[in-house]
Amino acid sequence: MKNKKAYGYLALVATSFFWGTTWVASKLGVMEMPAMQMAYIRQFLGGISLVGFFMLYKKFPLPTAKQFQWLIMMSVLMFVFANGLSTWSLHWISSGLSALIGALYPLCVVILERLFFKSKPLNKLAYIGLFLGLAGVGIVFYENAIVSTGNGIWMGVGLSLLAMLSWSLGTIFMVRNKAHINPYYGAGWQMLLSSIILFAWAESSLHTVPFSNISSKAWMVILYLVAIGSIVAFVAFIYSMKTLPAALASLYAYINPLVAMLLGSLLVNEELTIHILWGSVVTLTGVYLVNMSMRKTSKKIITEPEM
């Protein structure tokens, strides 16, 4: 039992670090090739690896028709829009800012649940958390957009906000509609299905490049995202959630944006100032307070953003 919990802590560390690095890896990738093309290649390779493993080695059957309906909805919300748009946003904004906006989704879940599903009224702690979360992003956004103006930053922020909203909707849908399918196997199908949709979208309406023109650096990024982001970190996340208390296992969500910011400044020369760091701490404190307030009112928020 002690060993299992120790491995849970290792899994938490791996999740916190590796999911932070995937934001920077994606930034490096979109500097080499179109974002949506990179997204569908990544999702296809990750999906076919997981689905192939479970079907060929574990002898899992095909999902039922009802499960496929659930998987298609989840793939659209979690991988086509959430992952695809957040990857696309990196053409215009830093990996740290995109990661921080993604970390806001628990706040968005709380608001959506309150507006559309009439959940329990928010307490004072939740309101304080919502205020801090939005204020912190405002500080970071000011530093990025006002102080360091850049072409298309509004486009990048808009795409990142849409991605965060889609992940929030996917979280609510997942909680309210159970599919009763192995989470690893289900994630593989979601990746695979999303790759087909992203392929059709990118190849029909967006700029793409021939596979022969994709640089070796871009392929290395894609392989890293598949192996580390889509498989290793995701498996580590599920393991930590199963072996550690939920409040502890969710700590990665407050760490990986900071990892993205620090590595982004080191590897792709993204600006990192005291205002950006301070704004990030304020934002993540707000997210923590909202999650804590929801636990006190027995309202569970699933923290599972993946880049």
Image (spheres, rainbow, N blue to C red):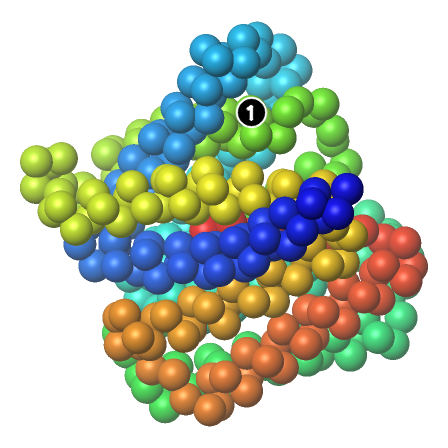
Q: Which residue is at a point 50% across and 25% down the rendered structure image?
A: 189
**Residue 103 image-quadrant placement:** bottom right
Q: State the image coordinates of residue 19 (x, y, percent, origin top left).
A: 48, 55
How crowded is the residue under tag 1: few (<14 C-alpha within 10 Å), some, or many (20+)?
some
Q: State the image coordinates of residue 86 (x, y, percent, origin top left).
A: 42, 55
Q: State the image coordinates of residue 71 (x, y, percent, origin top left).
A: 57, 26
Q: If the image is split into quadrants, where does the N terminus sit?
A: top right
User: On the rendered structure, is 248 left or right of 31?
Assistant: right
**Residue 153 image-quadrant placement:** bottom left
Q: Which residue is at a point 25% across and 53% down the rendered structure image?
A: 29
Q: Amino acid at mark 1?
A: Tyr
User: On the rendered structure, is 285 left or right of 221?
Assistant: right
| Number of numbered callouts drawn | 1
Q: Which residue is at a point 82% across and 48% down the rendered structure image?
A: 117
Residue, disc 1:
185
Q: State the image coordinates of residue 129 (x, y, percent, origin top left).
A: 74, 75
Q: Which residue is at a point 27% across and 49% down the rendered structure image?
A: 221
Vertical placement of 10 versus 99: above or below?
A: above
Question: Residue pushed farthest left?
Answer: 213
Vertical placement of 27 versus 2: above or below?
A: below
